[in-house]
Image (cartoon, rainbow, N blue to C red):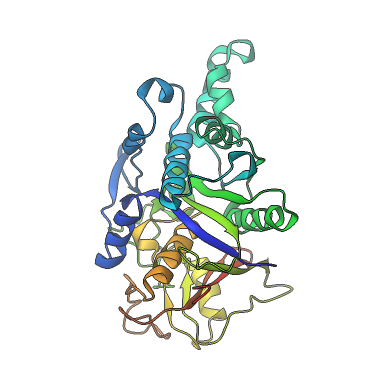
Amino acid sequence: MNGMQINGLGLVGGFGCGKQDMLTALETGCTKVAQVALRDHQFPLYQADTAPLEAYLNKRALRRIDHFSRMALLGAFQALEDAGQSELDNSRLGVVICSGFGALGTTFKFLDSVLADGDAFASPTAFSNSVHNAAAAHISMQLKITGPSLTVSQFDRSLVSGLVSAQQWLDEGRVDAVLLGAVDEYHSVLGYCWERFLGNCGEAEMRPLDFSATTAIAGEGATFFLLQPEAQDEPAYGLIEQVEMGNLSGSRPQLPLGQPLLLNCDGDPVTGEIYRQQLAGLQPVACYTPLYGASPVSQGFDLAAAALMLQRGELFACPDSGGDDFPYPLVSRGQACCGLSCLRYGLAGEYSAIHLHRGVD
């Protein structure tokens, strides 16, 4: 595949809103975890605040837009603003949204209305916002983008699948640029399922590099990237040179030796054991999920962290030390960085890897 330049970033998550808030979280190594009501107790959550969206859209325009699409809109506005390319042709701009669960809030709201009022009187507003492509439609309408749009939902491989689609559009010359976003939201039904599968461990912080313990904390948010074909000009945030996806039953990710590796560990010991078995200790590793939590698209935040580090040319310290018996070298603060990889393993051995470098020097 040809490379894709990252020339714009938009971010909203538990750490705050915008790349400066993300940089602060990376520099300090901490993010405040919110507590939301779940039945008769509190549930820890890296909660996203979409209030800054009012700087881009008035309240009337936002009246019928749900939380999921608001996060997507906020990330999209920021990414285009950050890129600062006023000459960009909106008819040649594609939109790709990646989501593991889609709009959970309006999906369950619509189902509740069907149960309460029957299918003849179910809420049409909730239905229209519950379809997975609603966020892409809101972005296209509010930003006046008339290029192709697509929503990809492949659970924890949604991001890499969306990146492959974006690359195909660019290679075919179908578009000049792609606005790609990874979005997922929290809902109380998800909180219930979370506790049923992982238990209510009461952990105050994520320790994802402790592969033997369940310390996962749910997260929500959106990460957006303005992607453009590899060119002679230096990219703003680095170059995505290769994307891999597969399953350990038939292949292995091709990880450049000695290059820093960003692990998307989420505090689940089942996937933690896969990381333990697959890592060879030949390269320094880091895990930044304690800054934004666990979700199907949290690898999008890894990609954003990688882009920011490539822009600065140096790494941030890993917020989780992994304990005294952690067997692999960790990245160190201020370590020079001209290339790195983002890696995620799933429960069934599926993997996704994104390889980046700084691009033209």
Question: Residue 164: x and y, percent?
Answer: 67, 58
Query: For the point 56% across and 46% down, which residue is it?
Result: 99
Work out whether residue 284 or residue 233 is closer to the camera in this orientation and state it: 233
Q: Can residue 296 be seen in this view?
A: no
- Report whether 60 appears left or right of 103: left
Work out whether residue 58 or residue 45 is closer to the camera in this orientation and state it: 58
Q: Name the quadrant containing residue 51.
A: top left
Query: For the point 71% across and 75% down, which residue is it?
Result: 251
How many labels sit on residues?
0
- Report whether 279 appears left or right of 36: right
Query: For the point 46% across and 72% down, which residue is it?
Result: 262
Q: Is residue 243 above or below residue 104?
A: below
Q: Name the quadrant containing residue 317.
A: bottom left
Work out whether residue 287 or residue 348 is closer to the camera in this orientation and state it: 287
- Report whether 190 appears left or right of 119: left
Question: Residue 80: x and y, percent?
Answer: 46, 46
Question: Residue 84: x and y, percent?
Answer: 44, 49
Q: Is residue 89 above or below residue 200?
A: above
Query: For the point 34% across and 45% down, which residue is it?
Result: 47
Q: Is residue 18 visible?
A: yes
What quarter of the picture does the N terminus occupy?
bottom right
Question: Residue 44: x and y, percent?
Answer: 32, 49
Work out whether residue 104 or residue 147 is closer to the camera in this orientation and state it: 147
